[in-house]
Image (tube, rainbow, N blue to C red):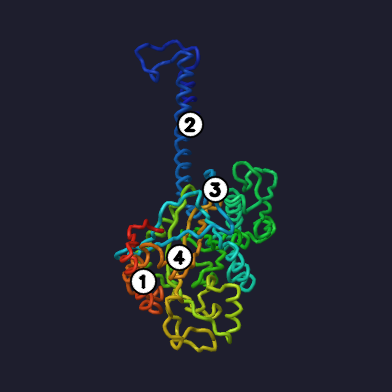
Amino acid sequence: MRLCASVVKQFANRYPMGATSWNPGQTLWDGAPSSSTFWICTSIACLVPLFALACQLSWKSQHARAGLAKPDSAARWTPQLFEYPRIEPCQEYGFETTLPLPYRPFRWGDYYVTMGLRQGEWDEWIQLDNRFREYHRIKAYRHSIRGQQCVQTLPARDHVASGAEAAREAVQELAEYLCRRYPQVYEVKRALPRANDYGWYGEGQIQLITITPLNVVYDLEKEDPMAVAGMLAQDDLALMITGTDRKHYLQAGSILVPGFWRLEDKIGLPLASIHTSGDVPQYKEKLEFSMDRFFTKLQPDKLMARNNYFVQVLYDCPPSETTVHTTREFDPHELGWSTSSLGVEEAFAAGHGLGDQPDRDTGSNPYIPSSNRGSPTAGDLFFRTERQTLRRLPRTGAILFTIRTYLDPVTQLANEPGVPGRMASAVRSWPDDVAQYKGQHRYKDVLLEYLDGMHEQQVQQGRDQSSTKYPF
């Protein structure tokens, strides 16, 4: 704009209005123009810097939409306008009848450590089945006895924002999605629409949400948003927030049915430490760089999904173990915590996955599975798989990580066409560090003998459909 004023001033001083000495052979800058020429030239002089300014603002806007922050505010997120794609109600869902989806994320052949991400479907962000009642009961029980060890939101620290605002956004996003996708399950009461509220498609934000088959009501404005969010569906939830050091921190979570890790060990840690403290195989070599890049570049208009899997041993509970026995009444298959493999949760030593816990005095953990239990049978083995989704919340920029766990008897999977042979091949392909992390030594011989036998039966019966589409 200073350039515009300078040009006009010089032009007026050199060629006052009314001058008539202009020669047609001169350029606009060589002689006095007519009145109309003066204003044309003045307009051009003003428009050039305005055009440059517009280009600069457009460039900044494009980079903000791409999630690229200015160097002096690398971790500052600019809220984005994002309208969740219109979703179709899942009319076929039955609270008591819809079976869990048969995720079988293992392949024939070699095992590769990768992120394993795929594009998710917006309609399928959160998936419910007929185990919702059971999961809700287990989650409520675990929250009642473990409290902030399972559900927590951290305040702001020097290098990273609080998880509170992200938790509020997360619970509203979940409630909006669930009441639209499963209207037969959720009823909502809304406030009147206000500018910049959390409501979708111009509707007022949700105040109350009722899970009608359970007759449970949650107040989204008065209750702990992270606690409510964790009870609305079968998934566990984690919120990652980018700090001023460009690292991604676990600032809030509802981790109620993790099986073999605890929120209390991970809350507040950056992404890399979450994985290295858990001794995740080949994280540094194969995953760290790609995960950091993915978390940095993920945008609100992308929904990503992945699966993993484990084998979990479930021993009979000795009647003398009253604490464990009480927990089994609420969680008979150890969905929330794998006591049979890891001992009681309170004495767990983090950093071993489903591998062996370090040797210690049994007085500190009275229920440690010992060698005198003998080998498990095929009936003691359960297939544990997680369907995880990741999306960036548009207002806070937090990454919402959903973790839905499925737990089924191996004997059930082995009756599915093509599954026992493919699963046996996958288990045999695990590298040593992966096998240790998954606790393979506890069940390898029994599992493979059983799967091989079931595979042979299917081959003889012509039921070995080895081309079953991944990941089902």
Spatial CA distance of label 4 from label 1 is 18 Å
Mark linked to residue 451: 1
In this rendering, does residue 362 appear at all?
A: yes
Secondary structure category for the residue under label 1? helix
Pinpoint residue 94: horizontal percent, then vertical percent: 57, 55
Q: In which quarter of the view is residue 273 placed?
A: bottom left
In space, the residues marked 1 and 3 are separated at their CA atoms by 51 Å
Answer with mark 1 or mark 3, whichever residue precedes in sequence: 3
Dots 1, 2 in contact, CB < 8 A? no
User: In terms of image quadrants, where is residue 114?
Assistant: bottom left
Specify the amino acid type for callout 1: Leu
Q: Residues within 10 Å of mark 2 (few under 14, many from 20)?
A: some
Q: Secondary structure at mark 4?
A: strand
Residue type at mark 2 is Leu
Which label sits on residue 461? none
Q: Residues within 10 Å of mark 4 (few under 14, many from 20)?
A: many
**Can residue 243 be seen?**
no
Residue drawn at x 66%, y 50% is 206
Q: Which of 45 and 173 lies nearest the eye of the viewer?
A: 173
Task: Tell me the distance, in whole angstroms, between the alpha carbons under discs 4 and 2.
Answer: 57 Å
The residue where tag 2 is placed is 50
The residue carrying pointer 3 sits among few (fewer than 14), some (14 to 19) or many (20 or more) residues within 10 Å by Cα, namely: some
Nearest to N terminus: mark 1 or mark 2: 2
- Where does residue 254 sit, x and y in percent of width and height? 57, 64
Horizontal arrangement in the rendering, residue 173 relative to residue 67 (left or right): right
- Residue of label 3: 79
Mark 2, secondary structure of its residue: helix
Question: Residue 3, image x and y in percent?
Answer: 47, 31
Quarter of the C terminus within the rendering = bottom left
Question: Circle 4 sits on which residue?
Answer: 385
Amino acid type, label 4: Thr
Residue furthest left as drawn: 109
